[in-house]
Image (tube, rainbow, N blue to C red):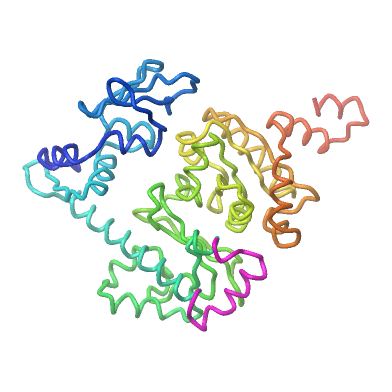
Amino acid sequence: MKRIRKDSLEAVLGRTDVAAVIGEYVRLQRSRSGYKGLCPFHNEKTPSFNVVPEKGLFYCFGCQKGGDVIAFLREIEGLSFVEAVERLAEKAGVQLEYEGADGFPDEAARESRERDTLYELYERLTSTFQWLLREHPSGKAAREYLDRRKVSREIQESFRLGYAPRDRRWLFDFLRKKGYSPEFLAGTGLFSRDHPDRALFADRVMFPITDYRGRSVAFGGRLLQGDGPKYLNSPESRVFHKQDNLFALSTSAKAIRQDRTALICEGYMDVLAFHQAGIGYAVAPLGTAFTDGQARLLRRYADQAVFCFDSDDAGQRATEKALMTAARIGLRAKVLVLEGGKDPAEILETRGEEELKKLSIFTINGDDFVVRRARTARDTTTAEGKALAL
């Protein structure tokens, strides 16, 4: 089991400003004993959440949650003890040391180093794909595609969009020259299983998928020309699990916390469209149905989910399932129904961001959506149909 040495833990706590960390999540005001603010763990109008930097502790008199800065991060982000300490160590600039059962570094430490190497690799590739999109002649078609879809340069930079070249061999050669072994590359999710030296993504606009900390952990790719699926996602890896991740969550987290609402739409381009229209709390599942894991992840930031999936039958069924998932996890739910059955990216492309922003206020309660769909899906001209619809 992965264990952090006691002296490393003490170094992290000694260099951590508890008020600064908690202040990233809670608007704090000076009080007699330290700081106070509205509790992030329950709804309240009068501040009962207190932070005492002197003791390195927080406590809420409303819901009775309290503890040190590690406990705070674990509660608000759903982290394990080790994950919370690792995040604080990164902020504080502390190099953690781990122990095995006998007091020496163990297998967990090796796995931690391999995960760090994978994070570094994905960060390197995100920057490389960005450069290829912005600067390289091979990225011209990708630039033209994004211009045609009315995706602004500001949004392209904010989401670190990139381009993967058509040549499937270049990535393997590029990374081998950087010192990565074939064995390591085989487990990165970047290459074909049948042809380990052939890149999974080729001639695609690249969408970096980040974890809650903003670290690149996977990619989505939109095909420009040729055969293959229109959209392709990275397979799961040591640092990426689809069912527990949402596209653009790290970018949207601040706005979601502020409004206590998340807008869940169908795909990458829809998320970009909403953000470009000034709706900064939009996220998307990763080619999967909205899962319990994704709902639990959102629950850390929001009290309400608004779903905006496609208006076709498949999209409407997905909306119904998502509403049930939200209810099961304790999220209030609404549905955004866009005029004319168009998706957000289409509205941005054909009518502009101001029009998309105007249309985005028309939501209905989840229960009303289910009733409306039941009525339109059945023949309500008969007594039996009316009974089924109700």
Compared with 362, 145 (above or below) is: below
Q: Residue at x 32, y 59 (%)?
A: 119
* Residue 145 is a magenta residue: yes
Compared with 302, 50 (above or below) is: above
Q: List x then y, in percent, for residue 249.
A: 48, 47
- What is the magenta range? 134-154
The overriding secondary structure of the stretch rendered in magenta is helix
Q: List x then y, in percent, for residue 109.
A: 18, 51
- In the picture, measured across the screen, residue 363 lies left or right of residue 174, that is right
**Quarter containing the N terminus:** top left
Along the viewing direction, whichever of 384 and 86 lies nearer the viewer: 86
- In the picture, measured across the screen, residue 277 lies left or right of residue 302, that is right
- In the picture, measured across the screen, residue 214 lies left or right of residue 220, that is left
Q: List x then y, in percent, for residue 359.
A: 74, 46
Along the viewing direction, whichever of 279 and 232 lies nearer the viewer: 279
* Residue 137 is a magenta residue: yes
Q: List x then y, in percent, for residue 282.
A: 57, 47
Q: Quadrant of residue 264?
A: top right
- Residue pushed farthest right? 381
